[in-house]
Amino acid sequence: MRTIRVALMLVLLTGLAVGQQVLDASHENESSIQAVATTVTTSTHPVERIVVPTYSDLNCAGFLSQQGRMDSAFVAGGLNTPHATSFSAGQVVYLSGSHFQEGERITFLRELRDPNRFEYFAGQRKLVRETGQPYAELAQGHVVDTRQSMAIAHLDFSCAGVAPGDLAVKFISHPKISYRSPEKFDIFAPPNGKTRGRIVMAKDFDGVLGTGQKVYLTVGSNQGVKVGDYFRITRTYGQELQDPVDSISFKASDVEDTQKYPARMGKHWFNRGQGPTIDVREMPRYSVGELIILGTTPTSATGMITFALQDVHVGDAVELEPQVTTAQAAAAASSAAPAASR
């Protein structure tokens, strides 16, 4: 009987010891998770307000391509030539070449050049040449008459005026895109190791951009980029140091009169003092917005900014975001909806 009691006590003590070890391990795990966890706030994780691309967005975005000159056919004029030099939806234009067939669908393009030749970042023109020739998508139409030496096409849809000399190519079809539900946007998300590139140029040669505007990236289908992919737009304070405008703010005085030892921005900067030295290159990378891919070529991708917290700049970096499953999207939408309604 005594032996049985001793055995039971040993079993009980062993169980308590194991339980304490498990409890201690769980506490250690909780502590480690808390050490690396991020507190979600409205300041660091605002809820996105996403703009969905329209038919015009998809078909008027333009692109960069290294395919070479697409000059097999061009617009020679229209019904009111020479009194009219720009043609839009509902009008007819004349096409050079005899290879057109009645009913054939046509896309009208313009090979672009920047008349200002202004660089938004050092080396932009060189990088654009390496990425591809810029093209604008002007209009869509179909051939209605091929009885004479020049085919006649009717403009069914126009993004901008079509002018003599613009290119007429086979219809460019843009696939439908699956859009993501609004999510909480992590401003300070660290690099995820996925495909990275840069905004090398924007539509209409703009440099300061916002929601709904189109941009061209230095990565394309050769890097695995697909229509419908989402990219995060990021910026570092080191980049701002290189910007001829933004860098001016770093040189401005930020000293408070009540500070005994004011900080200084770097050892060789305009601001000097006996206080601590701030190295802005060590400050965290931050995200300024998000874009969705509308089209790709082997060396470039066309994107539309769907969400922007502040101005997006030509030259900003982009990073491919992880694919979101249907279940994850539904969960994100349910969690974001109450916050968006407040």
Image (cartoon, helix red, strand yellow):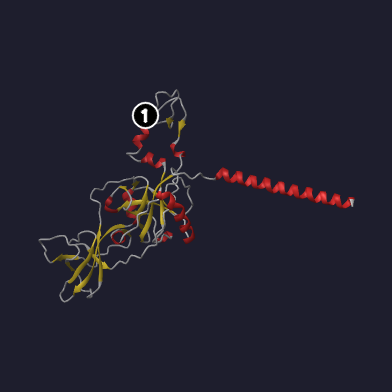
**In x, y percent, where is residue 104?**
25, 73
Which residue appears at 75% of the width and 47% of the height? 17
Q: Quadrant of residue 229?
A: bottom left
Left/right of residue 253 with respect to residue 150 in the rendered view: right
Q: Residue at x 71, y 46 (%)?
A: 20
**Extreme residue toward the left, this view:** 83
135 shown above or below 73? above
> Which residue is the site of mark 1?
253
Q: Is residue 330 above or below residue 97?
A: above
Percent position of residue 274, x then y: 45, 24
Which secondary structure lies at badge 1? loop
| Residue 261, quarter of the rendered image | top left
Let me know if residue 68 appears in the view. yes
Say left or right for 132 vs 182.
left
Residue positioned 47% across, 39% down in the render:
282
Which residue occupies the foreground of this view, 149 or 47?
Answer: 47
Count the marks: how many? 1
Residue shown at 31%/50% (left/top)? 125
Image location of residue 322, percent across then percent down: 47, 56
**Residue 85, located in which quarter of the rendered image?**
bottom left
How far from the left and from the top, in percent, is residue 49? 38, 51
Q: Amino acid at mark 1?
A: Ser
Question: Does the image show residue 122?
Answer: no
Towards the viewer: 91 or 226: 91
Near mark 1 (Cα within 10 A), the count class, few <14, some 14-19 or many ≥20, is few
Q: Is residue 302 left or right of residue 114?
A: right
